[in-house]
């Protein structure tokens, strides 16, 4: 549903869509059947690949029938059972509860989202490191509260952008380690344990899905809020870049430009900084979404919340998709960014002598360089970038 | 995209979907062509119904091409032009800018959303009025901070719910009066006026769309924030009802129950208060969305904002759709709500003598009735309900 | 507590502070005693002015003792009773509940906040109207997505700002009509009615406080959310002005400047656009606060919510104070705004021929004026301003 | 300012108040003077303890003069200079910018807030571990979507609460490591480096303040958003506990009670679960505040943002103080929580046979225990608690 009104949406094709989630739910149920078989709880004939049973149109059917139980799991089970015969229909979902299926399906999609973002982070970091190194000595006026402050170099600006991205990245790495989410009716795994007192069905299912095993976390939603916070933290960092590009690409300033500008439907001359606009857009919306995840986490109640769980899926899915898009757009923006060194110098010159006033006050004149720890900052950012890229390889 | 993870989504079928918005965009361009013809600016052959030119799959095509210009309008125009010949291709969109087409298309969808909500509001008000009247004298314990407070009647509780809904409704009525949103490249309608110096093209186009005319409001986004606030205000009011149903349908309390409970995927005995859960869900998410609309309104800049406009469409569309769903669910909830008068009386009796302590302190005993202005509150709510229903007819 | 970290706080001196609220709570209890006497429920000796009993240090005493009952009302009553003798100590607060006292005290403060804002709105509107009229014909480049779009006049820009403010003002006027908030233990006024079956104690108390009477609204919090929305809507409108001033006061653009710039602690040359910075700051924070008010309204439960009411007071007080400050700062900003007509013309000239491309495409050349409905927009804004100022007088 | 309207505020006495922040700002300037002396940049006479120069009333003076420069630092410097003579007045603040002083002062206060919270976390964890161990086998009905689900033990409920708290704690530990925040006029430390080309003044100052050194982070605000997210994550976890206590302390359920209930101003019988109400209150407000911190982080621009920095201080201070209060209240709540084992058993019995339906369906009868991995969950939580407490010692 978000495609038309969220330009760039196709950068996120197939990820966490309704179709993808329905298939992921079928994957979870498939893994559970396999676990039941492997542990000799169920007969071998039960090990069916349910994903293959899905048909075009199922998503609409399931979605339409989801309201009465409050989740799409029950109608999916009904539909799958109608296409299974014999014991598989009977064993399907035995020992699970709806939340298990939906949460674990979401985990699969969210982990893929994190992977995609990390891929784009590596590209961003490479571009930023190259820009910081290339412009280590490119003079430019720092601006504070919109006004020229002191001379800096564009390399310092880029090292700060890079530092912001590298500050935010570890939270994603940590939050991306989402484990399997299976707890049974009330988080005690009572039914699963009754079916298989010796073997751990959850570990078997997790293995099949390539997920780490975990004790139930049905009402401990920190894993979701931490992911939301990590995604929003990234968008924050990207938005600083976008904001600076937007300011600097105003023709009166003219220091930066997007590689390819965006067209207007009525003004032929327009080359709009569209990627920056769209990245900034994502940052304006993300805090409201991650706040909703926190509100939901704080509204947990009993052994399954009465609405707080239900608001989470669509919220975190939207946030994850938008962050994937913004991350990809930021990688594109940085790859093609155009730097006008001459305009930087000209704007700095025009800001004189005011922009030299601090130096004059402190050192008596404005004759020497006034770089402070610029090189230390750039070097530190480049080292961190190198470490990040080595880890990402 | 939201169907699977937002159970009840089919209550909002076809409204403000990508397909619906694409068609609405074509309607806006159609109206503009008609206006150009009517005012003799363009030849009669230009009056084409563009909606008929749309084909299945166009939404995906347009959405995929939206990023470079930051909106879906330009790719839609490309596609329409490829299917038009001669002067219509040339006159298409002349005098408009992308924001005009998209904003006015959204206006069409948002007005329909408001209409649907008002329809469900009328049903809610009817149910609430009937419940308030029927239970004017049904004794019940008031609870404050979760603890029994003083005796009230269930009619008072319902009258308060009804009052909350009626308090929120006028904001929707006011906010629903969204006008046409056409301003041209920079909100001065310069191109349109150059094309037609005498006649007001915008009024003609608005007429075709059944919308009130209006001066440009491209960066004055109060119309959107007020709608968001109105929608959130309604969800707030419905959530109070849902919260009370959720509490009272706990079996230990047992005073209220949903008409049809929702099933569980693993627990056969379950009759979950699913509608209340889903209404409550909507209320947890709405404030974050309307806050984003305000953030966007406060981030307006220049004659078209650099991201703040772009975040608005998908946000308000999501909020509107969810409010339509929650409003319909609330109507269903109230229509079928089951009241257990005996349990209300039993819980009140069990709370004695504590629940009578205030009365005893104030009047010396707890012998007489202790209704205060209960009847005045119920009567006032019923009168307001009558006025509302008369206006809604 | 917010003074040091919210520069400009002294524009809001004494409003809705802890001291002011404690006095207002005493005023509410005083009005209630007066009502009891007037209706012959209590003896004449009970009509004490409790505000006079307050002493320096009481605020700290009361605040420190507020936790156990969850509100400051009970400790205030304890303190007042210790300073009263005889019947007044006994009659104090009889028939009220804590929420009545605190909510009505807040209402008194919030109404004063609205009055102050309206006063500053009148000044803003006067400045904006003068600017719009003075610069009706001052040529300037419109910018969309940060890039030059088409020629406009600065008067159009100002008329849009003015329109935004005038769009937001009526919501404040409507929301400012907060009535007395007295409902008794559970919103039925049972105790008050038992004390005075014939006369309406609430109306008497409301009269004393200069407030409109009202039926209880203890859990219908739309009056609070509507006020929060109105305040946020104003801040949104002011932020658009601030954002445009911030952009245009960059020296590379140089079209606007604050009357008096702000100094830096280290850079002698700095003249920062501080008022715009501080107005913008308010707009970044307001949506989060009004969202919290909505969350609280949606978390109403029973006849007094278990936390949702308790979060409201400090949130709405902070939002109201900050809006008073931002409104006053906006009035100052606009009164002293400096317009550089020559820079506007120079920037427009530098944007040629691109900025004329739409006109050339539509009319074949860029020779004539290209004002569209600029004058209609300015005239409409000036008329609305006149109506507003007449109503404000 | 928040005391009266935020009951429990005195649990946070003196922390991050205006007075405390003014003193902390003076501490930062003192440390800077000491660093200048230690590195032989300034004469020894300059090493003054500025905190001793502060007088009652300074906070008001400084706050009142903060608007024109947008921060309280400049007026504080003016005031200190008026009380210094000779070289100290001249050397004061040399090489710093206002943001350095204010950010580092905030860091000092925020670190203290984190320390206090960790202290209360240790107490919470001890209480929760004791409760989980004591009630490992206490039968109770799990509730999902408000309805009885399957039998569990109260120990499982507590282990889930404990797990939630332990999930959130590491984020606080990580976020609490806030370093010194000194970057000079534009984040390059140009002036400081010009004063002392060899020695690192920042490290010396950081040493004096007991803070880790750090390269400038003036526009990389992840350290602040991560702290905000960590604080909100804790409040989320505490709110789940509070919500469950609120539900279970309804007399119809009666399974839990606060140690000391809160009184009402009008209902003598009332023993309100006030601590839970107040903890819940904090959780309703925290997401809006941390969202504002993210919005501010995403609105960074240039080398010092034009408003986004200015909104941060008061927001994070409020969030930190409220979290300290809620953490302390949660420790009190848990220390004194009363558990009614008999009511748990009775409610479970009343929920039969429905509550046994899953077990019957899965195992054929409801005869044996149905604990699943309850003991594994409790044991894991107790082990994690032990590790946490060992680290906290």
Image (cartoon, coloured by chain):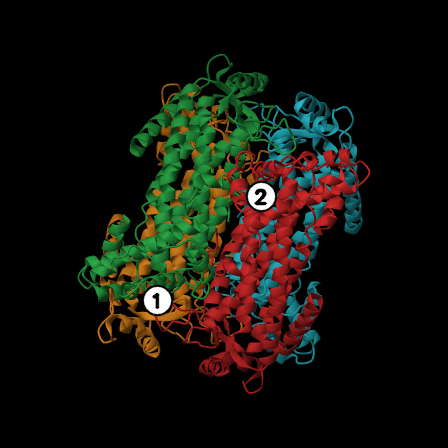
Chain colours: A cyan, B orange, C green, D red
Work out which quarter of the rendered image holds the C terminus of chain C and state it: top left
Q: Is residue D237 above or below residue A247?
A: below
Q: Position of residue B383 (x, y in %)?
A: 23, 55
Say what secondary structure mark 2 lies in: helix
- Of B155 and D389, nearer the camera is D389
Q: Quadrant of residue A177?
A: bottom right
Give the class, few, some or many, for how many residues have Cα within 10 Å of label 1's Cα (few <14, many ≥20).
some
Label 2 and label 1: CA atoms lie apart by 45 Å
Say what secondary structure mark 1 lies in: loop
Labels 2 and 1 share a subunit:
no
- Of A217 and B65, nearer the camera is A217
Q: Is residue B152 above or below residue C377?
A: below
Residue B377 numbered mark, or none: none
Residue D298 visible to the viewer: yes
Identify which residue is drawn at 41% across, 66% down: B145
Going by the picture, which residue comes out furthest to the bottom?
A: D367
- Of A26 and B188, nearer the camera is B188
**In the shown orientation, is residue B258 left or right of residue A264?**
left
Q: Is residue B140 above or below residue A282?
A: below
Q: Position of residue C273 (x, y in %)?
A: 55, 30
Q: Position of residue C192 (x, y in %)?
A: 25, 63
Identify which residue is drawn at 28% across, 68% down: B153
Return the residue at label 2.
D296
Q: Quadrant of residue C246?
A: top right
**In the shown orientation, is residue D116 left or right of residue B187?**
right
**In the shown orientation, is residue C67 left or right of residue C33?**
right
Identify which residue is drawn at 38% across, 74% down: B254
- Of B87 and D27, nearer the camera is D27
What chain letter is assigned to the residue under label 2? D
Residue B337 numbered mark, or none: 1
What chain letter is assigned to the residue under label 1? B
Residue A287 visible to the viewer: no
């Amino acid at each position: 549903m978000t495609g038309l009104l969220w330009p760039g949406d196709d950068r996120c094709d197939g990820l966490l869509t309704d179709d993808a989630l329905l298939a992921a739910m079928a994957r979870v149920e498939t893994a559970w059947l396999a676990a039941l078989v492997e542990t000799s709880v169920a007969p071998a004939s039960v090990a069916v690949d349910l994903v293959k049973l899905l048909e075009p149109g199922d998503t609409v059917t399931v979605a339409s029938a989801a309201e009465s139980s409050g989740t799409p799991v029950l109608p999916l089970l009904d539909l799958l059972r109608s296409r299974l015969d014999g014991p598989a229909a009977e064993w399907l979902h035995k020992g699970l509860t709806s939340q298990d299926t939906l949460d674990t399906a979401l985990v699969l999609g969210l982990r893929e989202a994190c992977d995609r973002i990390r891929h784009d982070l590596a590209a961003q970091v490479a571009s930023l490191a190259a820009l910081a190194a290339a412009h280590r000595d490119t003079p430019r006026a720092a601006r504070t509260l919109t006004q020229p402050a002191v001379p800096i170099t564009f390399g310092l600006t880029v090292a700060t952008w890079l530092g912001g991205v590298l500050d935010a990245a570890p939270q994603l790495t940590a939050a991306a380690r989402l484990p399997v989410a299976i707890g049974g009716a009330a988080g005690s795994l009572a039914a699963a344990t009754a079916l298989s007192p010796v073997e751990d069905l959850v570990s078997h299912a997790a293995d099949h899905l390539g997920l780490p095993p975990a004790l139930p976390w049905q009402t401990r939603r920190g894993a979701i809020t931490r992911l939301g916070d990590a995604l929003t933290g990234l968008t924050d960092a990207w938005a600083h870049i976008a904001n600076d590009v937007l300011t600097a690409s105003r023709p009166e300033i003219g220091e930066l430009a997007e590689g390819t500008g965006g067209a207007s439907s009525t003004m032929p001359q327009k080359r709009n900084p569209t990627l920056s606009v769209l990245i900034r857009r994502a940052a304006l919306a993300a805090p409201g979404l991650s706040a909703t995840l926190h509100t939901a986490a704080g509204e947990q109640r009993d052994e399954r919340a009465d609405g707080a769980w239900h608001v989470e899926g669509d919220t975190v899915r939207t946030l994850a998709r938008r962050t994937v898009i913004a991350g990809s757009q930021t990688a594109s923006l940085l790859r093609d960014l155009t730097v006008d060194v001459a305009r930087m110098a000209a704007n700095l010159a025009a800001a004189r002598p005011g922009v030299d006033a601090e130096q004059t006050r402190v050192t008596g004149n404005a004759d020497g360089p006034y770089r402070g720890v610029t090189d230390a900052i750039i070097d530190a950012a480049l080292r961190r970038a190198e470490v990040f890229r080595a880890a990402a390889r």
